[in-house]
Amino acid sequence: MRVSVKALHRTLLRGKDIKAIVVFFSFLFTLFIFLSLKPSGENDFERERQRLLSQRQTVTYESGSREKLNMSLLWLSQFKSATGFSTEAFAFIQGLEDRVTDIDIFQFDGEIHEDYVRNLNPEAQKLIQRHWMKEGETKVYDVIVFHSVAHAWQPFLYRNGLYRVGRTMFETDGIPKMWKTHLNYVNEIWIPSQFNFETFSRSGVDPSRLHIVPQAITPFTEDAAKLIPLSLPDPVKKDDFVFLSVFKWEPRKGIDILLDAYFREFEASDPVCLVILTRKGNSNASVFTEKISRYVDSLGVPLYTRARFLVLEPSLPTVLMPRLYRRANAFVLASRGEGWGRPLMEAMLMNVPVIATNWSGTTEFLREDTGYPISVELLEECSLGELQGADQQLFGGQRWARPSAYHLRKLMRYVMSHPLESLKKANYAREQVITKYNPHVVADIVVEQLKRILTRLEMEGKRRRV
Ligand SMILES: *[C@@H]1O[C@H](CO)[C@@H](O)[C@H](O)[C@H]1NC(C)=O
Ligand SMILES: *[C@@H]1O[C@H](CO)[C@@H](O)[C@H](O)[C@H]1NC(C)=O
Ligand SMILES: *[C@@H]1O[C@H](CO)[C@@H](O)[C@H](O)[C@H]1NC(C)=O
């Protein structure tokens, strides 16, 4: 049927049609205004984060295509203790498995935590089955790696190695006094960062004995987008912006600075909650909650306007960690010094924007382009008053950083009000962590170090060329 334009106009512009058109367009207009006024932020953040997480980041690695060293290696570490050394050590071995013909591993310098061993992920369980050193092993290893705090190294321990490597790190501007002797019980030292290269050499360690080998980390999952955010109990509300902090309860972690910044910057009416996962001995969440409340009382922050916070039970199963990071909108740590800062790297793996102190081992991977570095006010004597016994021996006479609580406040507020920008940074950080600190990538660096050592052993006639 043909309808002329004129006829169409005539039909459309009849009085009641005009009314209908006006009603229709004003409805459209109202809808438009409504949609544009709808608060953006949380939902956009969630949607964008989900989109970014679903872009898989993997390192293509063909096992078997790389050089394999024909050598024997014994790696000693706190494999069966619930410490960062343990997760670090497993990530090293995971990468080295295809690159070294003969690897043994064994527990060194650390209490065995049965619970931790039972709950280890299947990959770590398999590494233990395949590589755990046999009882009464008598072979002579080409290289033995002592991976622990340096004061555990002794000349009489594990003498069945042609060459001894010490893997360690430290969090201050120097090293513990007693380490000076212990560092001599190994042939060379592998530290994770340029920061430690400088602090160790300034403390008198011969720089030619220092080699930088970064930490490795195994991505939690290849399908990060499928993880369901952990649902957190009261007082966390569904739409809260969650600042997550994970640390051992000790003065070095800058807990006072974090609490100062958070409770001065935010109030009860802010849609925000600080969620803390911390450990110290057998203390439970209510013990930490009590300590935090008392500290915030001392700041003079009134109870009725106080921003919300939640302390998680320290017994939170480690398998839930990826989902906890998935729920966080930002990760924050005002530490006075770090050897490396594994939880920061874990947060980065889950696309969580990181706010942390611009000092120490952390600066190896936390910069303006991968997160939000907190500026440092000054270096000050380690606060021994709050530390006990062995810690005095470790930290006495050294300095660490005082991060700026003022700058931290500004950064927390900024990240909260620029969610999409912070996600963009977090996504770049994730890409960096996965491509630079993947176990296979770090294994390349370790293999280079081992080759250098083998060449030296051959030149010194201690080992035959094979
Ligand atoms: C590895 O080295 C051993 C001696 O340490 C030698 O007997 C063996 O043949 C070598 N294997 C390969 C594949 O080169
Ligand atoms: C937490 O620890 C305190 C002190 O040891 C104890 O009194 C309290 O009952 C514990 N609370 C829970 C929920 O286990
Ligand atoms: C972090 O430290 C670096 C190196 O000292 C410095 O260039 C940078 O300005 C610092 N950033 C902040 C936010 O303090």
Image (cartoon, grey):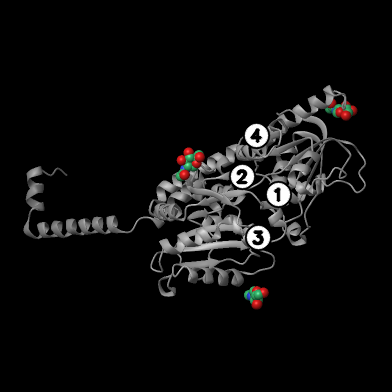
Question: Real-space Cα distance between discs 2 and 4?
Answer: 37 Å
Q: How far apart, in angstroms, are the residues tagged by discs 3 and 2?
A: 18 Å
- Which is more N-terminal, label 3 or label 4? 4
Q: 305 or 415: nearer the eye?
A: 305
Residue labelled with disc 3: 387
Q: Is residue 31 above or below residue 143?
A: below
Report helix, strand or loop for mark 3: loop
Q: Position of residue 11 (x, y in %)?
A: 9, 52
The type of residue carrying mark 4 is: Tyr
Ligand 3 within 8 angstroms of badge 2 C-beta: no
The residue that mark 4 highlights is 61
- Residue 63's image quarter? top right
Q: Which residue is mark 2?
A: 173
Whichever of labels 2 and 4 marks the residue nearer the N terminus, that label is: 4
Q: Which badge, 2 or 1, is on the more N-terminal residue?
A: 1
Q: Residues within 10 Å of mark 4 (few under 14, many from 20)?
A: few
Tell me the kind of residue under disc 3: Leu
Of tags 4 and 3, which is closer to the observer?
3
Amino acid type, callout 1: Phe
Mark 1, residue position? 85
The residue sitting at 75% across, 47% down in the picture is 178
Which numbered disc, 1 or 4, marks the residue closer to the eye? 1
Q: Earlier in the sequence, mark 1 or mark 3?
A: 1
**261 on left or right of 175:** left
